[in-house]
Image (spheres, rainbow, N blue to C red):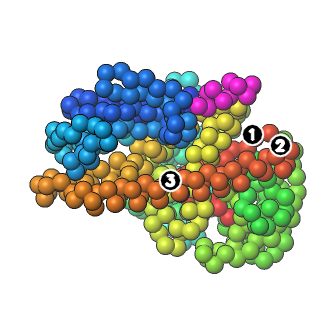
Amino acid sequence: MSALYTAAAVFFLFGITVFVHELGHFLVARWSGMIVDVFSIGFGPAIWKRKVGSVTYKIGLVPFGGYVALPQMDPSDRKPDEGEEAKELPRVAPWKRVLVALAGGAGNMVLALFLAYLVYWIGKPSSPRERNCIIGFAETNSAAYEAGVRIGDEIISVDGEPVANWDDFAMKAALLQEVSLGVRSAEGVREIKVPTEKNIIGVWSVEGIHPVNFSDVGSVFSGSSAEAAGIRPGDRIIEFNNQVLWSREHLIWLVNEARDQEVPAVVLRAGEQVTVSVTPRYNEDTGRALIGVGFSMLDMDYDSVVHPTPSSQIKGHATAIFRFIRALVTPAQARAAAQGVGGPVAILVIFWWAVQNSFMVAIWFACFINVNLAIINLIPMPPFDGGHIVFCLLEMITRRPVNARIFSLLMNTFFFTLLILLIFLSYRDVVRLILPQFSNHRAAEAPAQITNQAPEEAP
């Protein structure tokens, strides 16, 4: 596949994600009678712009986002620019500004639903969880483990109803506070009863068990034992310490068990098996041994096509991002979670890899990004949409706008903090994901570490 086609597809998928978000703000703002100064895709100097009526439409040089300039979203009175005729803009009711703030994420969710239907209708390469309901790991402190569930067991029914795959199992378990599972193992089929618990998004689930998945390396941390062993982004770790891997969680457990021991690991690289030796080292921040890799979470098997339902796709994407946000605010997991964050460069690298391998995987990933963007923008702090919503709610409660100086201080402080964070993440993405491709004389074809990586998935 040509690089020109891939680049065009990548920027189209990334651009349409930004466009629908800003279009949501724009349309609701116009509906509510608000003044719109600028509609921009991208930031920085304009490479194209045109003024139609009172609105300037433009494409910015830096393609990592966009904005709609709405002076009436500012709770204070707008001050005219130098040389501009002083005039007071009509105030807009806070409930209308709330709708404008919500409209961006709503646009992303509409696009995500459309993309999910495309994946459902056309199909995409599958992940193991979409094909079966085999246990890839069972946490030793879980009720399921105590009931006898082990790695390699297969869940074949829930309360007597057969299950087709892991998502089917999860949906059936979500309806019950205790489930009777039909479990098939080498010893035969048995029935076990386990309780369900509410997960991060309030859905009932059987905690402590994980599906089969792939240990695909998305990034290798500088100075880590994995780097010393020669493990590269794009490798799939298939064995560790002479044990065949069932999942990332299984690898994490084996890594911790082999603390300070030099052990063999087998990776699949460009269709060939390569054996390396690696030594897990204890990390005080995480409280366990690590080898220093971040995982790609795409889990794609290109020999098998599936048609996941739109609801299961949206639910899976939302669960992943909520799980990651919870990890970021959990002190014991925050540092490891932060190491798993990818920025705009990582997103573009993943899109590139996905388009090169399967356009439908790229569509699926675009759906994931849209769900993520909708949720992240509701974080209740400026300059996210959630920050504007908080200001509007305060105005509705106090019946007066937030102090202009406080608003300006908070917006500028958080904006520049976010800008510095994006620059840092972009630099780290380049070091982790792009430079290793040149040093290894490889094309940039490896899947990248993505933003919903949970801390327990980075041994």
Range of residues picked out in magenta: 1-11
Q: Which residue is mark 2?
A: 442
Q: Nearer the viewer, residue 15 or 419?
A: 419
- Asked which secondary structure carries label 2, the reply is loop
- Asked which secondary structure carries label 1, the reply is loop
Instruction: Name which residue type carries label 1.
Output: Glu
Measure the alpha-carbon separation of dots 1 and 3. 28 Å
Tags 1 and 2 in contact by the CB under 8 Å rule?
Answer: yes
Position above or below: 193 against 368:
below
Per the rendering, the mark at residue 275 is: none
Q: Residue at x 37, y 33 (%)?
A: 38
Is there any visible trace of residue 170 in the rendered image? yes
Measure the alpha-carbon separation of dots 1 and 2. 8 Å
Which quadrant would residue 81 be assigned to in this image?
top left
Position above or below: 385 against 2:
below
User: For the residues carrying marks 1 and 3, which lies nearer the camera in this image?
Assistant: 3
Instruction: Name which residue type carries label 3.
Output: Leu
